[in-house]
Image (cartoon, rainbow, N blue to C red):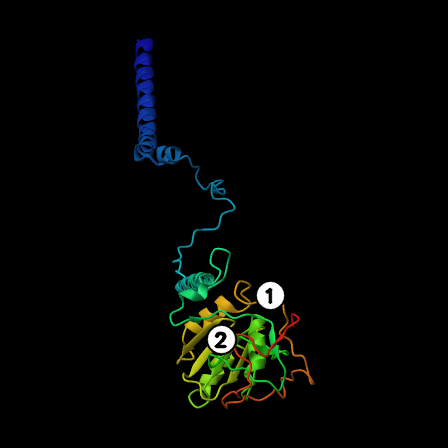
Amino acid sequence: MASGGSGRRSGSSSGSSTGRSSSGSGPARGKSGGQRGNGQRGGQRGNGQRPNAKRGPNPVTRGKRPAVATRRQVPWLLIGAIAVIVVLAVGVIGFALSRESEVSAWRPSDDNRDPSLAIPGIVTGQYAGQQHVNAQQRVAYDRSPPFGGPHDAYWAACNGVVYPTPVRSENMVHSLEHGAVWIAYNPDQISGPAVQTLAARVQGQDYTMMSPYPGLDQPISLQSWGHELKLADPNDPRIDQFISSLRQNQYTYPEVGASCDALGPGYFDPDNPPPFDASPPPPDAVTMDGRGAQAGNGG
């Protein structure tokens, strides 16, 4: 009996103890299980982070500045300036090439010895060279102004000289024999800016000279040895064509390589040149075939 009661007590006690223990631990496990159910620990473990852990620098972005969104402006002013420069350069180069092509067409060569023959209005003639007269003689020239034939033994300075007064024709023709171009103009028809326009083609240009020529039947007349061109406009492009074709054209004048420099006082003084004589030549004037002239010595 005693052992039986003791067994019940023992069982009861054991059961109570077990029950209390079960009931006592039940809420704790429930709480813990609730925490697991809420996913706090699982969420933290799932995020790969520990509570209160400090985040280190990202090795991918380390050392890089944060990107700043900026709007890049187009430099229209610079682009416009460059475009203008390019257009101007193309224009200048094109003009230079065009100008060179134009000049080349009037430049003498072995294949085109006298380009002036293509100039509208050109007049040509054949004249013998090295027929000289003295300072007192006149020549009965067949053209006015003359562009060939007997002439004075001393040439007029033709190294870019613009004579303000008319000059004796016999001296001017000798310069043509040396390869010069002579621009003559009628002072009653050409004056002021028109004279300056013509003079700009002469000043500083070797083998070129210019002078007034009273009584000229046209405003302007150009002469080289054996060639003449008369025109009215000082801006006529044929003036440049004539000069390019005939100034020092070795195929068209007798004394290639002869000088155009001034001889000086006692010979021909460009500061005091012998004057032009507009009167008709006297009966004893030297004729165009050279009668009355003396043979020159290459001067």
Left or right placement of residue 247 versus residue 68 in this view: right
Amino acid found under the numbered disc labelled 2:
Gln
Closer to us: 90 or 149: 149
Closer to us: 11 or 170: 170
Quarter of the image for residue 218 reads bottom left
Which residue in the protein does label 2 denote? 223
Q: Position of residue 34 (x, y in %)?
A: 30, 33
Up-down: is 153 above or below 281?
Answer: above
Up-down: is 252 above or below 170?
Answer: above
Q: Residue at x 38, y 72 (%)?
A: 121
Closer to us: 225 or 50: 225
- What is the distance, in whole Å, between disc 1 and disc 2 at their CAs? 17 Å
Closer to us: 29 or 2: 29
Q: Position of residue 39 (x, y in %)?
A: 32, 34
Q: Residue at x 47, y 63 (%)?
A: 114
Amino acid found under the numbered disc labelled 1:
Val
Q: Position of residue 89 (x, y in %)?
A: 45, 62
From this viewpoint, is residue 101 visible?
A: yes
Q: Secondary structure at mark 1?
A: loop
- Of the 4 image quadrants, the one containing the C terminus is bottom right
- Of the 4 image quadrants, the one containing the N terminus is top left
From this viewpoint, is residue 81 visible?
A: no
CA neighbours of label 2 inside 10 A, class few (<14), some (14 to 19), many (20+): many
Q: Are marks 1 and 2 in contact (CB under 8 Å)?
A: no
CA neighbours of label 1 inside 10 A, class few (<14), some (14 to 19), many (20+): some
Left or right placement of residue 66 versus residue 262 in this view: left
- Mark carried by residue 256: 1
**Lower position in the chain sequence, tag 1 or tag 2:** 2
Q: Residue at x 33, y 9 (%)?
A: 3
